[in-house]
Image (cartoon, helix red, strand yellow):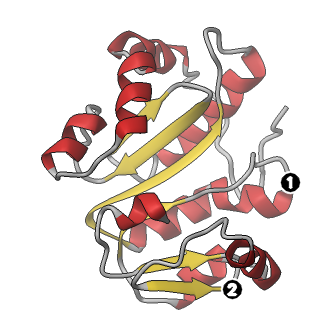
Amino acid sequence: MAEVEKHRPVSVDFVEIDPEITKVLFRFRLMKKIPGLNIINQDARAWLTETARLYDAVIVNLPEPETFQINRIFTDRFFELTRTHLTSGGVLSFSVEGYENYIAEPLRRKVSSLYNTVSRYFRYYVLLPGKKIFFLCSNRKLETDIPRLLSEKGIDAWYVNNFFYGNLTAERISSLNRALLPDAPLNLDEKPQRRR
């Protein structure tokens, strides 16, 4: 939330299904209370189904999609639902386990499945490789020089700048995109893909 606060949002909806987790986050100061923060203790898909709100950004911050419960946030239906709740320039961001120098075949299949699924619902997408692979998805063109964009907005992003320019070269981004499998199966609600 400290990073989100730098962007001076009018409001932030934090959706967490378990109210006890939210209590622990605040009790032990693992999450900062910022102006405009709304805590919603509900399933994320249920919330998006019920609300009419539009968002400039939807940030998914979950563990690997290895269980049916968590995988529901990485399927075709969630991506479609999210798209309908983004403003025209809105961005969906999520991440999965990444790699240092070589993408192993199981990870390659997982990332390809997610890429093939999300690309059905968004015109533009960027995959940023590293210890985590970040997916940025939108229906407007995306730029990859994130530190420059943050600097232009006057947002201090020391960590992002040093990490980004040190590890996210155009060659690494291009290499990940070349490794994607165009025939990897989609991650569907009715047919979730194995994650190993």
Inspect the image, locate mark 2, and give the three-letter code of the amino acid beneath it: Asn
Q: Quadrant of residue 183?
A: top right
Q: Alpha-carbon distance for marks 2 and 1?
A: 20 Å
Please state if 143 lies on the left or on the right of 182 as rendered: left
- Answer with mark 2 or mark 1, whichever residue precedes in sequence: 2
Name above or below for residue 64 compared with residue 126: below
Badge 1 local density, few (<14 within 10 Å), some, or many (20+)? few
Say which of 53 and 100 sits in front: 100
Q: Residue at x 60, y 33 (%)?
A: 132
Image coords of residue 141 (percent x, y): 22, 44
- Front of the two marks 2 and 1: 2
Image coords of residue 124 (percent x, y): 32, 43
Badge 2 local density, few (<14 within 10 Å), some, or many (20+)? some
Image coords of residue 121 (percent x, y): 43, 54
Question: Which residue matches tag 1?
Answer: 67
Question: Which residue matches tag 2?
Answer: 41
Say which of 119 and 56 sits in front: 56
Inspect the image, locate mark 1, and give the three-letter code of the amino acid beneath it: Thr
The quadrant of the image that shows the C terminus is: top right
Please state if 80 lies on the left or on the right of 166 as rendered: right
Please state if 138 lies on the left or on the right of 92 as rendered: left
Q: Secondary structure at mark 1?
A: loop
Image coords of residue 153 (percent x, y): 16, 52
Residue 118, numbered label = none
Q: Residue at x 49, y 65 (%)?
A: 1
